[in-house]
Image: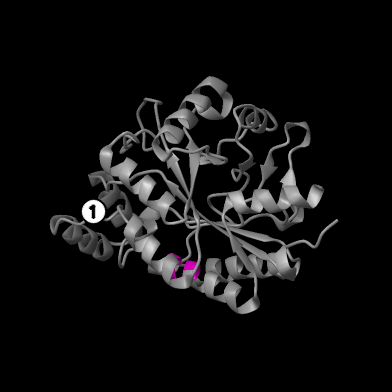
Amino acid sequence: MSETWPAGAPYALCLTHDVDRIQKQLYHYLFYGAKHGLRTQLRSFRERLSGREPYWNFDRIMELEAGLGVRSTFLFLSESASGFGPEFWGRYEISQEKVKAVICALDRGGWEIGLHGSLLSYRDLDLLKREKDVLEDIVGRSVRSTRQHYLNLDEPGTWQIQRQIGLEVDSTLGFADRPWDCSRGVHPFYTGESGMLELPITLMDTIGLTDPGIRRDAERVVERVVRAGGLVVLDWHQRTYSPGEYVDAVDFYVSAIQEAKTRGAWIATMGAIADYWSSRKD
């Protein structure tokens, strides 16, 4: 068996972005205004009035990560489910020219493009395959990495259909409201007979990092993974990089990258981790 991470790196960091919504809707201003206060939402609304879409932050992320010398995985959604509720509102069409253009720009720049499986696709092989085909037509290459929307996961069925359509690495296992339960392991693992590699989410940007206590808990969990020589997976939605709106979450993200570089960690995309983990079996 080879060493855990390339070149003896003490741990690995995987950076991912779920692209759920690309345009901020009125209900977002109202909901987050009621939840977090009106000041940041007024600033966000002024940005919208100036012609800058608060959720369209791909250029900001590309500039940030390029400046730090890292690359991440962007997971794009093609939603077809319909109904009433926030999970159905504000969707975008992946076939929009500006969406296709940013996918191709990310791919050219060295970022990985992955599939964010739609609300119902975690149990529907044909639907998931259609979504994968659409994304591959846009990017012009095969798509290997995935995460299911709303972290929907039917174990082991979801992993089985993902692998059947040619996906290789998933990062759905985890929580949106709390850090990863490290007692279940901190390394990638193959999901039984499916052959799908799973990268558990260590932290999502939705856990409430503005709260000092939650931030300390998050830092402790990351440190536990680091000391175990494991894999830290960050799931930070691209909407989080709206200026002045999620300052604490962006600060956490940047600090995690800087600390990883200081400690000599391996910072990699989902696909790169899948390649290396596969090589360890040989």
At which x and y percent is residue 60? 34, 63
Most common SS among magenta residues: helix
Crowdedness near tag 1: few (<14), some (14–19) or many (≥20) residues, C-alpha within 10 Å:
some
Which residue is outermost to the top? 126
Can residue 119 be seen here? The reply is no
Q: Is residue 74 above or below residue 115?
A: below
- Hey, what amino acid is under mark 1? Glu
Which residue is outermost to the left? 50
Count every numbered label the image shows and give the total. 1
> Dot 1: what SS?
loop
Question: Which residue is tagged 1?
Answer: 53
> Residue 250 lies in magenta, yes or no?
yes
Q: Image point 60% across, 79% down: which residue?
A: 262
Q: Is residue 113 above or below residue 70?
A: above
Q: Is residue 231 above or below residue 147?
A: below
Q: Nearer the viewer, residue 178 or 22?
A: 22
At which x and y percent is residue 261? 58, 74
Is residue 58 rendered to the left or right of residue 54? right
Q: Point out the stretch of residues depicted in magenta.
A: 249-253
Can residue 90 be seen here? The reply is yes
Q: Image point 33% across, 59% down: which residue?
A: 59
Which residue is outermost to the bottom? 262
> Residue 137 lies in magenta, yes or no?
no
Is residue 20 rendered to the left or right of residue 265? left
Q: Nearer the viewer, residue 129 or 49?
A: 129
